[in-house]
Amino acid sequence: MTTPSQRDRVLLAVIGDEASSSILLTRGVTLTPALPPSVQDTITGLLLAGIGNVSDRQKKNFLVVDAKTQVSTIESAFQDFTERKDIAILLINQHVAEKIRPTVDAYEQAFPALLEIPSKDHPYDPAKDSILKRVQKLFGDV
């Protein structure tokens, strides 16, 4: 049995809300023609573009978060995505990351890289970004 390497990490994962507007890339990206203007949801748009992935074991590379999604579900998805060896980057809407901030702040691995992104209804706030805080701390800006 071979051990996984960084080259085995070919997917992006996303934890996002229903009103996000971001772009994800994954294995062999093949984008369909422009999505209709009405498609503004991160997850929905990605799935329509063929970006989503469901493995042979029925593991998805996305989690749609809405008002009914429990924090434990978000934390569980975060743990799953950060432990998977096929995921290179995890994108999470910043306001969703706020719901699990202690878990996000405790994450220190290089892979998968963690990026907090804005959503359509929640603008990006650099003061809340855990990665930016670490960079500022390294450079003595805080």
Image (cartoon, rainbow, N blue to C red):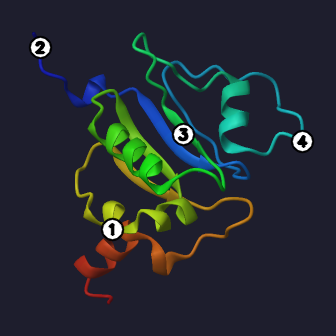
Of badges 2 and 1, the one in the foreground is 1
- Gap in angstroms between the C-alphas marked 3 and 1: 19 Å
Of badges 3 and 2, the one in the foreground is 3
Q: 125 left or right of 81?
A: right
Please name the amino acid that badge 1 sits on: Pro
Residue 12 picture location, percent across and down: 46, 35
Earlier in the chain: of badge 4 and badge 2, it is 2
Query: Which of the numbered marks, if any, corresponds to residue 2?
Result: 2
- Gap in angstroms between the C-alphas marked 4 and 2: 45 Å
- Gap in angstroms between the C-alphas marked 4 and 3: 21 Å
Residue 126 picture location, percent across and down: 51, 76
Of 31 and 17, nearer the camera is 17
Q: Quadrant of the N terminus?
A: top left
> How many other residues sit within 10 Å of disc 2, few (<14), some (14-19) or many (≥20)?
few
Q: Quadrant of residue 44?
A: top right
Of badges 4 and 3, the one in the foreground is 3
Disc 4 marks which residue?
38
Disc 3 marks which residue?
63
Please name the amino acid that badge 4 sits on: Ser
